[in-house]
Amino acid sequence: MAALARWCVRHRLVAVLLWLLALGSTAAAAAAVGSAYSNDYEVPGTESDRASRLLAEGFPDLGGDGDFVVWHTGADQTVRAAAVEQTMTETLDRIAELPGIASVAGPYTDGGSGSAARISADGRTAYATVTFREQLDSVDPAQAEALVATAKAAAADGLDVELGGGAIGLTESKSAKTAEIVGVAVAAVVLFLAFGSLAASLLPIATAVVSVGTAYAGIVLLGHVMTVADFAPMLGTLIGLGVGIDYALFIVTRHRKGLKRGLPVAEAAEQAVATTGRAVVFAGATVCIALLGMLILRLSFLNGVAIAASLTVILTVAASVTLLPALLSLIGPRALSRRERRRLAERGPLPEVPTGLAARWSAFVERHPKALGGVAVAVIALLAVPTLSLHLGTSDQGNNASTATTRQAYDLLADGFGPGVNGPLTLVTEIHGAADRLALDNLGATLRATPGVDSVSPVTYGDGDGAAFLTVVPDSAPQSQRTSDLVDRLRSDVLPRAGTGTSLDVHVGGVTAGYDDFAEIIVGKLPLFVGVVIGLGCVLLLLAFRSVGIPLKAAVMNVAAVAASFGVVVAVFQWGWGSELLGLGRAGPIEPFLPVIMVSVLFGLSMDYQVFLVSRMYEEWLETGDNRVAVRVGLAETSRVINSAAVIMISVFLAFVLSGDRVIAMFGIALAAAVALDAFVLRTLLVPALMHLLGGANWWLPARLDRWLPRISIEVPEPRHRARIPGRRDRQDERSRLPM
């Protein structure tokens, strides 16, 4: 690390230009090829996947993405009124002529299949189905915008027109730009307050922006070679800005400490990377390992998210140990504030002794470990209570903000035709002979008598003895547990019984069934994933600190942080506490992939603070052999930096609530809550309290295991063999000045 830092310092302009070249070239390539994201929740081998494949094979001309136009009249007229019918018929004709539109099926077509069913029982709501020529992933957003503009032009007093569907969702702005600006601005303020130097406060932001910008463009390119979800770039940006600014903050803090000790700028930068830079690489590696742990789930949807997020973390770490030392050498002594530079010139180098709130808090925890530990446990337990009611599912346009046209169309359809119309089930089967046809024709009556079914469409047959399908509309909302129960009932009881004596093998598909299958796979593999991630963390900490107790405490802390942060997410998004007020839409289930990604990210983020805090305690323990002094000194010297880093990360994460994307907002609130709990409750309260209570047992390791384990060093201690400088006190003098 020292050699790398030395090269970057000596060739600082080359290092900066190389990073700018990487940013510019990847951004240009991404702009040239465009994005190719895919939200493919289908899991190979599941019943919904088999239904989807069979439908595509049996009905290749079924069409592309299906969307809908919904209109609703006032109390003084119905949708059958001559003026309304003329207006909407002309509108639908214009829509049919738009580029990219394959067909339009409305309620006014004489003899049209299902036309009567497209008008509600009260006659005040109607809808038309608009089918694009391309599937959703290939629909041009400009074509969707043209559809919205044409349909909205028909709206008038007493006639509301709204649109819904996947392609329409492309037209609703979901941008992280505002969130990024707000998050970076807050981070800049916190850094300036912490450093007192404008130049020093801008460096972590510059480093994070360059690395995250490069990663963002890289994720766009990645979408062309593998499945990458559309929220992956924003998720990568969220994680990258948070950890990138934090990693740079740790290194800049160590660099400033070296300057205050009288080191030359180049040597201070090299030493900061050689010491704290090692901890940054270790922490970043654990984040990447945890994220790539999602690959063991073998889900293509999560594979892309894992690799995209890992790419972002790798680039932020690389920038922290290469670009940052180059920038530090460029600004020279201005990494210190004017007052600090003047004091250094007048008084010479002086050791930094923890004083103020950090030192007083460390001493307070030492005096009251039991009471403070109990308070921390109570806070975590209280916040974790909502997790007990966690309901995994996939949000849809019914969870969008109340002002969105997709949300209003969703509500109009639910009010006029029942909640199930927004999430119909598709039943698909192969047909082999007359017996199968007869059984399938009789299946409609059986389905209509099944509890939970609102309506059933006629059977649509393919050519010859091919495939056939029919549509079942539940009487409950797509996200309702009753709908999931209906899917299970159809698969396990109704359909097998109806196919007795025939070769029928009816598969239940559709978006709702696909979401249920995806959630079931995730839940089934979650224990294995959590076990692997937590176990890996224990092994890494065991190697780093040569202690059994520290890894076990860290594992418990990680579980506690995840449970409590999920409690906050459940309260906001599932229970709806303030979700509409924050512009996050209506309450609904928690995304099934959130636990997996959250465990990965939180594991890495918590390792940052654990390593930074405990490594300083461990260094003091090796020197003094006194656990009480080690914990007090370690907490006093690191709590200020940990708290500053946490405030920055929380600000960045919360800013992403402004992105307009429910999934990203969910990640933002979950990660902000987890970091707040980790930094202010666990690492600066519960961890030191427990370490005071356990005493020397914190550092116990069986002798045989001690001989067997390899020896690694996360953060090399600062050199202590330098000659004493005038006015400098030794470390024992410094420890004696801490509050008791």
Image: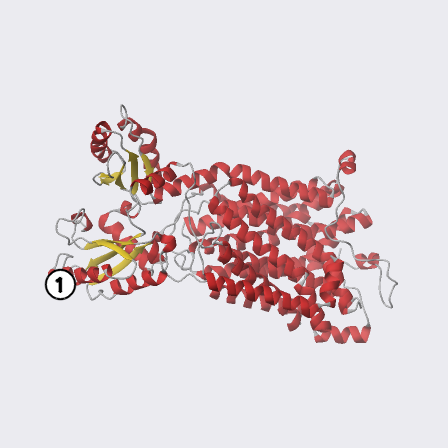
Q: How many residues crowd around disc 1 within 10 Å: few (fewer than 14), some, or many (20 or more)? A: few
Picture coordinates of residue 633 (x, y %)? Answer: 75, 54
Q: Is residue 137 left or right of residue 224?
A: left
**Residue shown at 43% from the left, 43% from the top:** 392
Q: Residue furthest left?
A: 82
Q: Quadrant of residue 316?
A: bottom right
How many numbered markers are drawn? 1
**Residue shown at 24% from the left, 54% from the top:** 103
Q: Is residue 320 above or below residue 367?
A: below
Q: Which residue is mark 1?
A: 83
Q: Nearer the viewer, residue 228 or 251?
A: 228
In the image, what residue type sits under mark 1? Ala
Picture coordinates of residue 509 (x, y %)? Answer: 34, 40
Q: Which coloring applies here? A: secondary structure
Q: Residue furthest front?
A: 464
Q: Is residue 580 above or below residue 426?
A: below
Q: Quadrant of residue 437?
A: top left
Picture coordinates of residue 716 (x, y %)? Answer: 76, 53
Mark 1 secondary-structure assignment:
helix
Q: Is residue 598 above or below residue 90?
A: above
Residue 482 seen in the figure? no
Q: Is residue 682 left or right of residue 163?
A: right
Picture coordinates of residue 370 (x, y %)? Answer: 66, 45
Q: Quadrant of residue 540?
A: top right
